[in-house]
Amino acid sequence: MAKKKKFKNNKKSWPKEKKPSIFALPEETRKRIWGVVVFILAIIITLSFFDLAGVAGSASMRALTFLIGKAVFIIPLILVLGGLVFFNVKYKKFFGPTILAIFILIAGIAGLVESFRPETKQGGWLGYILSWPFLGLFGGLVAKIVFGGVIVIGGLIFWYLIRGPRVKEIPRTGETLEIEKEPSLIKKIFLPKFKVKEVEPKIKETSTKLEEPILELRTKEVPAKLLAGEQYKTPPLELLETDKGKAAAGDIVTNSAIIKKTLENFGLPVEMSEINTGPTVTQYTLKPAEGIKLSKITTLSNNLSLALASHPIRIEAPIPGKSLVGIEVPNKIRCQIRLRGLIANPQFQTAASNLTIVLGKDVSGFSCYADLARMPHLLVAGATGTGKTCAADTLMFTERGMLSFEELCPLSLNSETNFKLKLATRDGIETTSKNYNNGICQFYKLSTGRGYQIEATSEHPLWVMNEDGSQGWKAASLIKKGGYVAINREPALFGNKVDLSDFRPGKIKAYHRKIFFPFEMTSQLAHFLGLLTADGGMSIERRGIHRITYTQANSQLLDLYKKSLKELFGITQFIEKGGGSNPKNKAKQIEVNSKHLKEFLSYLGMDSVKSPQKEIPRAIREAPKEIVTAYLRALFDNDGYVGKNSIEFCISSKKLVSQVHLTLLNFGIVSSLRIKKTKNYAQNEYYRLSIFGEEARKFIQEIGFIRKEKYNKAKQFLKLSPNPNLDLIPHISSLLRRIGQKYLNRFACLTNRGWKYQSGILVPKYAFSSLRSYNSGFRAPGYQGLEKILDFYQPISQEPEYQELEKISKRNFYWDKIEKIERTSGVGYDFYVPGSDSFVGNGFVNHNTIFLNSLILSLLYRNSPDILRFILVDPKRVEFSAYQDLPHLLTPVIFDPQRTINALKWLISEMEKRFDILSGNGSRNVDTYNEKIIKEGEKPLPYIVLVIDELADLMAAKGREMEAGIVRLAQMSRAVGIHLVVATQRPSVEVITGLIKANITSRLTFQVASQVDSRTVLDMAGAEKLLGAGDLLFVSADVSKPKRIQGAYVSEKEVKKIVDYIKAQREKLLLDQEVEFFDNHLAEDLKKSLEIKESESFDGYVGDEDPLYEEAKKIIIEAKKASASFLQRRLRIGYARAARLLDILEERGVVGPGEGAKPREVFSKENDSQITNEENWHKV
């Protein structure tokens, strides 16, 4: 009988903390203090050169000169390098290499100096002793080469210590890559298996009102104890938010009739049954007549989508457990499901399993839960529709001005920081809370018909107008050419920086004239910068002359430029000459030679020399509205043109014209950007910005021109030319038809003479003549037309269609059509904006929600750290950062692929240990073992849940090891309480391999781009028709057909509150008394395993240290036979381990090398093979 292994009830408490000492400084601070000491020593030695360090300094100088000669003058520089090493906190063991580098450099320099003039002992006694052997044996040239190499070695050591490991080159943001189309890379949520109570209402709509009883979690197997004598307190429900909005399906009776009629038109008679309204979709069920094939119904999804004016539609045929077919139609208004109501549900509170998790709500609106212990592992894939990465050079309208991510808050790769900033969002001006650098990303570059562009990852959602007239988020990879995206032009948000007093000109030794500089940004200075940006230039000649030039033919602008030079800088003398070699060119050039003026312009952000590289100076982009207005006025007056029907601006710099394009958008002016074809300029591209119609009228009102003749010409063309209404709203004809039908049903009745309206009610065709063309889709209304439509339909303002039209009207987006989609790469950034979870970047409305999984939080609401432990793997370094220092973690969040492999190996080792424990106790699984052990007063074995956030990144780095580890755990770890949750954004066969799919039968998928991706995860189609934003399908061993659920959303703010609450419990209790929070033998064991750097196989041994080596060696020597299959049979091991043992035996000389079909030669002992080979050689 196996010896029974008992766990001691460790009653010990945490050791008493020592009182903090003022000398117990952090290691980083101590390093920097030593660095300061080294710098001071370098300064003292430098002063001793000039006899300014007193008697001690002079004595030290004489001693050092005696020892190393002229090399003493390089010691301060070497000490400065040593001090820089102390300030580099990346390395722990640096003291020894630093001392070695200092000695090598001093020795090398002393020897090199001595090798030049050995008779004078210029290198001191050290140089003489080191150089004497080389000078005597090899000569002076070799000595110089040797000591030069020694200096280089010392310099390389310092270079490594100071600079650290090199970072791979980052691709340029705008660089286009030819990449094969890949699945959507969309963030995911961890949501597993459910249990649904069958209910059959005829017509049921979901109510979002929550019942919130006091949360008293009950667990049958293990009492949830946090500490000895203390009860684990679950976080209060007040930390979570309630559901947002109420789902509205529209006219469900009319839709039901449309479905029935459409199917009958195709010869498919059906009988409509119950209607279930969920948070995301409404399910219309029907019963086909006898003899009708279900395949005929499923092939009509596009026809039903057209008839219902709703997309996409999913058909479930048949519904599991019912003789009905379900047609799932997206709701007009969706309800956002939050975690609070699901946790407050008694079904969750009274669940018996400790690993009960929250899923969401199904198509009937009922709460769904799951037992992770029964699954026992979960694979998550697809797009939630809540990704969050766009290019680093994306420009945003903020309280600091129109700046990019990198200008606002530059970060190192794969890092984050708390960052508060007011910026423009979809719903107004809101404040950010965090800034993320997501590393190198693959982007979709979307270009619109008006020339607006944005680079976003495939999962990054943008606000779009769907074909049925509804607005919503859609991932960049799912936006097609011809789709409409929202361009935000409200609210205007400018910077407020006007102070220029911190500018300090450099010193010039030669004579120079005195120049004055303004202390703040003014409209006159903005005019000057606008003129100089348009037709100015800066250059440096060989003689060191700094030249600023401005070329213009218009005398009024030339006078304005001269006046600005005088009044702003006090410059009255300048060079005025012809603007070119062509005598017909009437332009004049104003030239000013001043280094200080050039420095001032560079300080303002005018660093570009060539025209194609010009941009709006940063000082202008950070300035208030009136300053930006003055700059644009001068820019357009100089390079602008008033045509027959537009105002145009043309220049060769793409960056400048793009910035002007977006700056006009901040004024509410929509312009068009096109490439201009120019003659005789084959190498250069010119870009033309055009402003038409009502937008031109806004430009004249908001900005205008300096010269009156241009201003009058612009006003004249507005009077003569028609006003093209380009501000149209696409795809709302279906909304207008539906609301028109409801208006008709409400206020009219059908008679023999047609429809008759009630008295006093306006008739559409008489009251609103354009409504018929709008309803048909022949014409699209503008925002003024939409206001008239809303006024007309005011009597039915409570209808969902009216509310949707009202939202469109209030937001006042410009809807632009996508014309071009490219693939690029670069550094990705993102803001987190609590509230609307959006921000405006490059004019586009971007979604930035951090969709953290509700699985972790639902488990935290049920389990203390004594019962449940997590291992979180986050290759992106941003998804699980909020869980750092959580008491439930066995180890800090893992980012590195190698540490992930080590964690898998440790879990396999822990799994085998637990099998031994269960076997010795006579228990089938961890639950029965814990029941027995608690009765004996011992601590229970905690559950361990490994959550891997992005499997694709890990498979790319360590594919073979990751697959082996996941498969090994998935096959055996269920009974011992170890569970896996593996997620990926890329559902491809290279990531979700056949072995992983075969061993993880429970799978959950969000929205994917194609049927191929859906079949990769679920082995069937359907996920490509999901709606995003948490809409998911789930299958498991118990549920063969996918079940549609709206997942629960948890914001980062909620996660932080809950984690802080749990951490506060521990801190409070540790301060109040000496207690032990958890028996940390698991954590300490895992920590040791994570630090292993040597390659280790999943057989549980490192390198050649296989415990079966000696036995295998003995068997082979006795049998005089060596093969992998022989070892497999005798040792009862797998082929991989047998082949590895055979390789080790060959390396150590026990067996000879393989020779095809011939058997290996077996030697009597190790290294006999070498002896035999030597004997054969002597015989030859």
Image (cartoon, grey):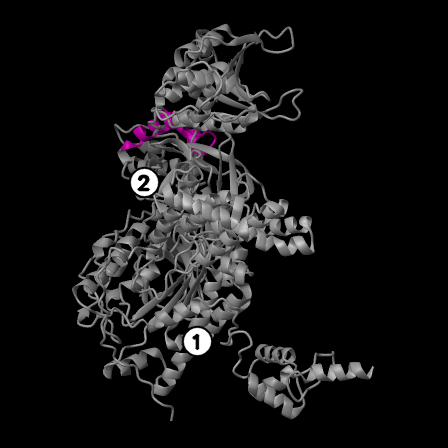
- Three-letter code, disc 1: Ser
Q: Position of residue 855 (x, y in %)?
A: 34, 61
Q: Earlier in the sequence, mark 1 or mark 2?
A: 2
Determine if the magenta segment contains residue 261: no
Whether residue 747 sits left or right of residue 681 in the image: it is left
- The label number, if any, that marks residue 255 in the structure image: none
Foreground of the two, 937 or 578: 578
The residue that label 2 is drawn on is 420
Tell me which residue sits at (54%, 49%) in the image: 124
Q: Secondary structure at mark 2?
A: loop
Name the residue rendered at 28%, 29% in the picture: 761
* Rendering quarter of residue 808: top left
Q: Which residue is mark 1?
A: 909
Residue at 63% x, 45% y: name it. 116
Task: Rate crowding at label 2 as few (under 14), some (14 to 19) or many (20 or more) other CA atoms within 10 Å.
Answer: some
Find out whether the residues at labels 1 and 2 contact each other: C-beta distance under 8 Å.
no
- Percent coordinates x, y for residue 41 in the rendering: 40, 46
Left of 230 or right of it: where is 320?
Answer: right
Q: Residue furthest front?
A: 119
Is the stretch drawn in magenta largely helix, strand or loop?
Answer: helix
Residue range of the region highlighted in magenta in the rendering = 766-794
